[in-house]
Amino acid sequence: MSAASLARDVKVMGLVGLAHACSHYFHLVLPPLFPILKNEFGVSYAALGALPSLFFAASGVMQIVSGFLVDRFGARRLLLLGLTLLSLSVLGFGLVPEFWMLYPLAALAGVGNSVFHPADLAILTAKVSPSRLGRAYASHALAGNLGWAAAPICIIGISQLTNWHTALVVSGLAGLVVVTLFLLLGRDLSDRVPVKASTTFTPAPVGTVQENIRLIFNATIIS
């Protein structure tokens, strides 16, 4: 593998990993603030616990939809859209004057979060050299876990220095900075793999084991 290939792979893994770290960071921006929010809004822990439940429910439901959208419109475009929506939602968390407003924002954040695995894995598979794919997927998972680890420290640290509003607003703005980096440095991060001219399908001769297996599967699908 050439130095240029290595540099390209590191760039792709770095940018995609950074986006994934942001996604996981945003998973945990609210739970560390629950005691503060409980006193601020006078709500129960059950009401607070419904926020991450709504977030992950929306994210889970939209995962399959995001997969189709990635295939239709491209992974880079969906990744940018998802990270922007997620960042703006977290920014909104810090600006709400009333507790109930957190619920629609949590749902929107979940929709934004749903794009990451379909988009990230599509980009890594298309752009990273096959010999480094295992390391690419591992670094992707590592980045997500680092995002989880960073969230409680950053959120509580900033809120103690300032207040919980600032902690959430700063987190949302940080996500928008990552979006800007993606726009500037990730213009070539496509999930489209060019089809080689030599890639053709040649049917197996009739009567061979390969052809018989193919016919069995075709008959199963048709039936």
Image (cartoon, helix red, strand yellow):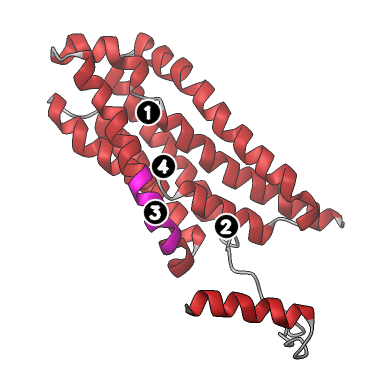
Who comes first in sequence, dot 1 or dot 2? 2
Give the number of the disc on residue 122.
2
Between circles 3 and 1, the one closer to the viewer is 3
Between circles 2 and 3, the one closer to the viewer is 2
Who comes first in sequence, dot 3 or dot 1? 3
Q: CA distance from mark 2 to mark 4?
A: 22 Å
Badge 1 element: helix
The residue lying furthest to the bottom in this view is 206
Range drawn in magenta: 60-68
Badge 3 element: helix
Image position, residue 162 (x, y; %)? 33, 13
Q: Label 1 belongs to which residue? A: 170
Q: Label 4 belongs to which residue? A: 176
Give amino acid for label 2. Ala
Residue drawn at x 58%, y 46% is: 16
With 86 as the anchor, is 215 left or right in this view? Answer: right
Q: CA distance from mark 1 to mark 2?
A: 30 Å
With 75 as the anchor, is 63 left or right in this view? Answer: left
Q: CA distance from mark 4 to mark 3?
A: 11 Å
Q: Label 3 belongs to which residue? A: 81
Badge 2 element: helix
Quarter where residue 167 is shown:
top left
With 206 as the anchor, is 65 left or right in this view? Answer: left
